[in-house]
Image (spheres, rainbow, N blue to C red):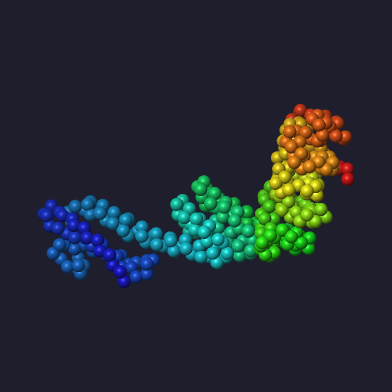
Amino acid sequence: MESKITVKTIPNKNETEYRMYFVQYNSTGSTGDYRLVYLPKQASRDANTIPSFRKWSVLALLLMAVLSASLFNPVLAQHETAEYRAVQEQATAAGIDADRLESLIVRAQQRGVSPDQLQGMIGPAITLAEKDLPYQSVLQKTLEGMAKRVPAGNIRMVTENIAGGITRAADVIDPWMARSEVGAMVAAVRGGRETGVAAREFRSTFIEHASYAFQQDTEEQTVREFLDQALTPNVVERHAIASVAAGLRALPEMPTSQENPGTSIRLLVRALDAGFTPGEIRQLPDAFRSAQFHSQLPADRVARGLDHQLRENIPAAHILENLFQGNVGGGPPGFTPPGLENREGRGSDRARDRRPVTPPPFND
């Protein structure tokens, strides 16, 4: 058992000195038994009586300082630290990276987030880790929320929604990853990694991208159709699984995806089949929007122009350059491919916002 004694001398008007002893008994390091003993100078430390003081205001101020600085703060700090560590141990046991947890705890303490609040915010990540699902986006959103001083309850709602999307995405991705064509592509691009490690990494990537698509209101059936159609013979032969992952990420960002998801699927699949790299696939949504802006054509006309360029086997870099410059149909500036001559509504904001009820037919 350890004890700590702080001695303070307080004179009164009669110049009679009194000594105050602050005694801390602590054997466990987490909680302790604290006593304040006030003794006159001539009394022994074992005395149990407290003499009267004329200046109680001075004594009250001194007591407040001692209690706040030496008593309550250490007890609360020790208690909260133990609770933070309990949250960390639970998360680490679930498989969450210890370094990221440490940074979370530090940020929580800096922002005044209690251990219970932290547990609520990262609880969804713990659940995901226990199911062997990617949890990093939940931790990242928690850090972002604390940095912006978002209320703990709001952060918890967001992380629960993210975790729900990831669980839902896994139900779509896992059967697809089990297909023989996908397994062959993973094995071909594993590099120096074991096949199982590479498959795990690709699985996490696809789950995160599918979850992102769901957050953007992409229908589950749309994601399934894209994944099924993306496995063309050319894609499988080139082992272009990374390009397929990029296409899944680009799917919800294509301007046609909300009202005409079939158009977006068809364009992305044709881009994959044409050999677009992951980086080129990721540029397609921005290139599409740029073509809309510069050409002042509605999305269905831009889609048909892009499809024409893809079928003409124009190199991916040239197609992207054409789209960014507003050259929808490819060819020399001002060239309009067959089927796009009717430019009714060009330059009208209302015409640009119109979408057909069904996707425009493509010539196979």
- In the picture provided, is 85 more to the left or to the right than 48? right
Q: Along the line of sight, which residue is nearer the eye, 253 or 64?
A: 253
User: Which image quadrant is residue 52 in?
Assistant: bottom left
User: Which image quadrant is residue 307 in?
Assistant: top right
- For the point 73% across and 31% down, which residue is it? 294
Q: Is residue 61 above or below residue 194?
A: above
- For the point 73% across and 51% down, which residue is it? 243
- In the picture provided, is 162 more to the left or to the right than 117? right
Quadrant in the picture for the N terminus: bottom left
Number of marks in picture: 0
Residue lying at the far bottom of the rendered structure: 1
Whether residue 151 can be seen here: no
User: Which image quadrant is residue 292 in?
Assistant: top right
Whether residue 162 can be seen here: yes
Q: Along the line of sight, which residue is nearer the eye, 265 or 119?
A: 265
Q: Position of residue 109 (x, y in %)?
A: 45, 54
- For the point 83% across and 55% down, which residue is it? 233
Residue lying at the far front of the rendered structure: 192
Residue lying at the far top of the rendered structure: 347
Q: Position of residue 61 (x, y in %)?
A: 26, 52
Q: Position of residue 325 (x, y in %)?
A: 73, 33
Q: Position of residue 200 (x, y in %)?
A: 67, 62
- For the point 79% across and 60% down, which residue is it? 181
- In the picture provided, is 304 more to the left or to the right than 173? right
Quadrant in the picture for the C terminus: top right
Residue lying at the far left of the rendered structure: 14
Q: Along the line of sight, which residue is nearer the eye, 16 or 56?
A: 16
